[in-house]
Amino acid sequence: MFDHPDPLQSGPMTDVYTLGEPLGVVSSGRVRHESEARLDVCGPEFTLAVALARLGHRCAYLGKVGADDLGARALSVLRGEGVDVGDVRVTEGARTGLLLRETRVAREHVVVHYRAGSAGSLLAAGNVPIDRIAAAKMLHVTGLTAGLGHDALDAVRTAVTAARKAGVMISFSVAYVPELWASVRDAEEVLSELACESHLLFLRQDELDLVKPALTPEREVVVDRGVKGATARSDRMRYDVPGWQVPVVDTAGAGEAFAAGYISAALDGLTPQERLHRGALLSAAAVTSVSDWQGLPTRAEL
């Protein structure tokens, strides 16, 4: 396989640097009966990057896509939203990964991953630009990318080490996807390691047991409880925000939209309560749209 950089040149120092796998996503009703589907592009770091860029923050994205139409679409969206994609690599001989989301009555989405051997899963430590991460204000990584395989995990660890050495703030979203891990024990080991390296930790209520060693008073921890709201613990104080007060169309993307809002407010120097409020606003915007990211607001719309 041969990697070549995206032709768009990297911009100035970034506010947030992130790395992940851009994916295509097909959403439909039950596939065995449905005759129509919707195609989009997605990924937790993808959503976060778009959300931050729409709010006026300089965000850079590292990842790999295939030399195919899905990869071209993902890059087109990121560029169009103002995300710096100068470090993205287009990989010949590997396809851009795909998710299939089926909507079932009275159930959460059934998600099938078609990403084994995908271009995004081939992200490696050698692709990580140490100097660019060291110059950023914040690094954001997720457990989903860490779960893609040994090479991707090495890339995440390399990025985290670079940030730590440079004194860059590290944000980590647990984003546990059981299908990506050999066992719960493997997931706990890696996710706890990364959570303990972070300064700012995002997780769902059902992920608390996965990262128990990281739940210490000195770490800023944000727990997303979905429709019940969210809680933040910062400087030994607890803050709460209520759940969505909007019509829910699709909850996909809500978690990373929330993280983006919280990070945006932190970059703006706002209080933890104000960070929670902005996170809740972006999360609410995400759930009112059929897309993970298309319904997210601009700074003017906030």
Image (cartoon, rainbow, N blue to C red):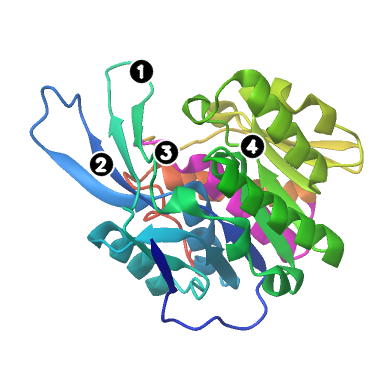
Give whichever of discs 3 and 4 has the lower sequence position. Answer: 4
Q: Please name which of the two marks, 1 or 2, marks the residue nearer to the observer.
A: 2
- Report x, y in % for residue 299: 53, 68
Outermost residue, left side:
35
Give whichever of discs 2 and 3 has the lower sequence position. Answer: 2
Q: Please name which of the two marks, 4 or 1, marks the residue nearer to the observer.
A: 4
- Report x, y in % for residue 292: 40, 47
Q: Residue at x 41, y 53 (%)?
A: 293
Residue type, mark 4 in image: Val
Q: Please name which of the two marks, 2 or 3, marks the residue nearer to the observer.
A: 2
> From which residue to which does the magenta span run?
249-271
Q: Is residue 299 visible?
A: no
Give whichever of discs 1 and 2 has the lower sequence position. Answer: 2
Residue 102 horizontal side relative to residue 108, left or right: left
How far apart are the alpha carbons under marks 1 and 2?
Answer: 18 Å
Residue type, mark 2 in image: Val
Q: Are marks 3 and 4 in contact (CB under 8 Å)?
A: no
Give whichever of discs 2 and 4 has the lower sequence position. Answer: 2
How far apart are the alpha carbons under marks 3 and 4?
Answer: 15 Å
Query: Which type of secondary structure does the marked residue at label 4 adopt?
Result: loop
The label on residue 26 is: 2
Residue that mark 4 sits on: 174
Classed neighbour count for the residue bearing mark 1: other residues with Cα under 10 Å, few (<14), some (14–19), many (≥20): few
Residue type, mark 3 in image: Ala
The label on residue 107 is: 1
255 inside magenta stretch? yes
How far apart are the alpha carbons under marks 4 and 1?
Answer: 23 Å
How far apart are the alpha carbons under marks 2 and 3?
Answer: 12 Å
Outermost residue, front side:
1
Q: Is residue 35 above or below residue 57?
A: above
Classed neighbour count for the residue bearing mark 4: other residues with Cα under 10 Å, few (<14), some (14–19), many (≥20): many
